[in-house]
Image: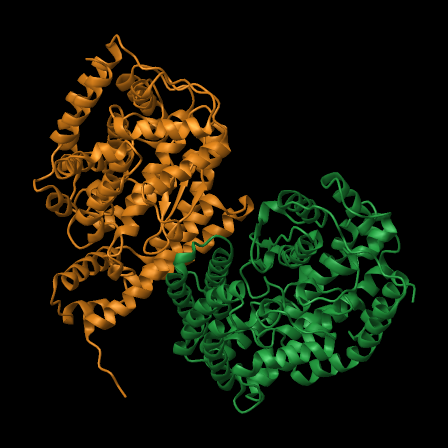
Chain colours: A orange, B green
Amino acid sequence: MNIRTTAYEDMMAFQRQTEALGQVAGRLGWDQETMMPRGATNQRAEESGAMEAVLHARRTDPRFEGWLAEAEAKGKVEKANLRHIRRSFTRNAKVPSRLAEELARVTSVSQGIWAEARASNDVAAFLPSLKRVIDLRREEAECLAQGGSLYDALIDDYEPGATAASLGAMFDGMRPRLVALRGAILDAEHQPDSIEGRFGTEGQMKVARELATAFGYDWDRGRLDLAVHPFSSGSGSDARITTRVVESDPFNCFYSTIHEVGHACYELGIDPDYALTPLGAGVSMGVHESQSRIYENQLGRSRAFTGWLMSRMRAQFADFNAKDADAFYGTVNKVRAGYIRTEADEVQYNLHVMLRFDLERAMISGDLAVGDLEAAWNDRFKADFGFGVDKPSNGMLQDVHWSVGLFGYFPTYSLGNLYAGCLNQAMRAALPKLDEDLAVGDTSAATAWLRENVQQHGGLYEPREVIERACGFAPHEGPLLDYLEEKFSAIYKL
Amino acid sequence: MNIRTTAYEDMMAFQRQTEALGQVAGRLGWDQETMMPRGATNQRAEESGAMEAVLHARRTDPRFEGWLAEAEAKGKVEKANLRHIRRSFTRNAKVPSRLAEELARVTSVSQGIWAEARASNDVAAFLPSLKRVIDLRREEAECLAQGGSLYDALIDDYEPGATAASLGAMFDGMRPRLVALRGAILDAEHQPDSIEGRFGTEGQMKVARELATAFGYDWDRGRLDLAVHPFSSGSGSDARITTRVVESDPFNCFYSTIHEVGHACYELGIDPDYALTPLGAGVSMGVHESQSRIYENQLGRSRAFTGWLMSRMRAQFADFNAKDADAFYGTVNKVRAGYIRTEADEVQYNLHVMLRFDLERAMISGDLAVGDLEAAWNDRFKADFGFGVDKPSNGMLQDVHWSVGLFGYFPTYSLGNLYAGCLNQAMRAALPKLDEDLAVGDTSAATAWLRENVQQHGGLYEPREVIERACGFAPHEGPLLDYLEEKFSAIYKL
């Protein structure tokens, strides 16, 4: 018996295996950050390079030309699959296999070098790798851009449809109001207390697990481990998260956890019919970040939810300073001098991103040499934040991104914040009693709204489109800035 | 500049990537047994199937025909590489891709079903998967055997050069003396005490780590985790081990750990120049098991080493019964009624293997239907061990092997014991003061001898050849049986 299959079916069967291999490669990355013995770094680089070679060969398989020419898409799911595969094939066919493999190999080694350089505050040990990574990514961008902007070509990997110009306009719209709000906050007479107390690792991890559960994380399809830089990894029925513990600052662990739960819940919330297809993963980094940030901030750092968090912390930690739930809310949201992007409050976070956006554009364009990066970072940081960087691990070595070649990725964090602001406005309108739920640790109405309106669609719509459909209006920075001004004016009694 | 490469070099470059991908596939298996969320089973089956499809396609790549025809091997390393690649290509080219993929997918799911069936003692829940696995492995064996013995074709995957006939002769040589020794032991007037006391998980894992360190396990290239069935996984610079904890029986954990350390040290002891080549892994399951068993038994269960182990246990556990080091030695080596192969003493272990050897040959030949397996197991167990199986998890569901299609694997355990007996005789002759070292927990002379004479060679020699070169005589069952009779006659005062 010979069953005739269509070009679309043949292509999707092939793609399904590629998606499964992509999951394997992703899990190899998870393993490297959580479980891998230190001495395995070089071997792992060859393993990752071999996986990348296989994936690249499949993504550029010459049969796609015929399949894409012949395939007929009937419904909107088929059309979306075709759109994703066509975009991926066109993109990857432009990059020589040799370059794709070398990028995988070099970034795998570079990540290990970065981790050691960060631990020992040794910028010089990292610069040769960083230079190599930038050179390779520039070479790749030249293949992709075909005469256009190199940086735009890189952004397209993370946020299809966005450009340096559109993101620059977003930052221009954000910057004045954020700077003004930050100034008013720092000048305010009323300043919340910082958190003080003893927060052991075991207790923090216990609360972190409670928080993940409260936000609906499906432990049957995920797990929580420690890593240097918190991340989430995987799709379908295996979406894992990591967090980190700083004993003096439990909010670092708790809000990293909620953040990564947001990412993982996006993946786990996608229509299961899309699993191992091009629609079975978050549609862009910006939309992904909208989920992690709305979980973390608009929900997790709300007055209502922090009241519940305080009670959970009371159950775990005997001794910490919180006069009452209002004071605790101020403590959670305290705006303070700080070096680290991932620990930044909602007001200053986007200023951290703008710094990276400007520096990485300059590195990719060639205007900023790698050897000048540390000085450029430190000068810009002083100018934006008013105090100097004390050590490289608090400066240019703080983030993993550049070590693994993620140029064009940082601005999607701010785009995610912008989207989260829009979604929050729409969600609050749809769920007028949300704060009553959050006050007892019940996020189910909010997470169900996000799953229904954003997460389930996976890659079905274009990034901006999925946010616009969810909100009922075209996304812009207004709702985020209005939200921040209202929230922090209340906390700081401005 | 165009650098001409030889057919041998081209082939080895391709093979190196395949070896790296094989490591990735192996790590996926490790993850499944240690870290994977339960709900990911089905997705993981697709991932493993996709990896197997890639590996099978590479192992049967048509370019090998040209490479193998043209490649010239100068030294013995090149000749050995060619021998391995030719054997692998010839073997894999006989199996259709569809069958290889289906085997990977089905065994991945079947392993999960086995684990649940074992936990709930539900044989009926496991039988349909087992039937499917056997059917597929028989189909594969038919492709491989090309008219010859199906079971011999399967053995060849684990022990090149061995056959059902040669292994049957080995068991025929072992059985009478083992049965006689077992009878004398069970009838003996003097019987060592069983271990009694409280052995918490944390304390057991701490001692397990001390034991792994004492046997030279390189933590920089490995790690220890918990799993249902202890195993080791990986080569080169990433060879991980697992163990399990039974709170009433610390020896289960300790000797599983030493056993897996033996496997891992074999992989880690291979000449680093062979990494990611066909010589960079243990040459056969029998030789592998010779290393795990000599670490576990001839070294780890020796009078000298158990004296040191007792002192380590005293440091960790306040309260357990051991009158003195001689009594403790008897307790460690106590021969008792037991259902579980991996917990069996050195005398009865090979009787467990013989049972599986006979039953799996009958299943592969078609003489034993899957539906009759439980009764056949229980009847044979009663006949060999003198008491009945109380529940399937103590009977036919105790081992993972059949669920993942490992038919022909069990007899290599006994072959490994035979090889360990031979190696022990040669090693003791070379290291007359070994017991003085072991008495203070120093295994370095023994592990260095094994690394030098066995481990470093990886796949350079054929399995029997590497043992014969190390021992200076052709391996046979005599040394093992002499060792067992001498050791247990002393313990039981026979």
Q: Camera-side residue: B251 or B467?
A: B251
Give the quadrant of the C terminus of chain A.
top left
**Residue A163 visible (yes or no):** yes
Q: Is residue B33 left or right of residue A277?
A: right
Relative image position of residue A405 (x, y in whole percent):
34, 42
Q: Is residue B40 above or below residue B122?
A: above
Q: In the picture, residue A295 is in which quadrant?
A: top left
**What residue lies at 84% left-to-right and 54% top-to-bottom?**
B303
Q: Camera-side residue: B3 or B450?
A: B450
**What residue lies at 26% left-to-right and 34% top-to-bottom?**
A438
Relative image position of residue A10 (x, y in whole percent):
24, 72
Q: Is residue A55 above or below residue A229?
A: below
Work out which residue is located at the far right of the displayed protein and give it. Answer: B493
Q: Is residue A306 left or right of residue B339?
A: left
Work out which residue is located at the far top of the displayed protein and give it. Answer: A189
**Residue B69 visible (yes or no):** no
Q: Is residue A107 above or below residue B399?
A: above
Q: Camera-side residue: A98 or B379?
A: B379
Relative image position of residue B45 (x, y in whole percent):
40, 65
Relative image position of residue A372 (x, y in whole percent):
34, 27
Q: Is residue A393 above or below residue B155?
A: above
Q: In the picture, residue B335 is in which quadrant?
A: bottom right
Numbered circles on residues, count: 0
Give the quadrant of the N terminus of chain A.
bottom left
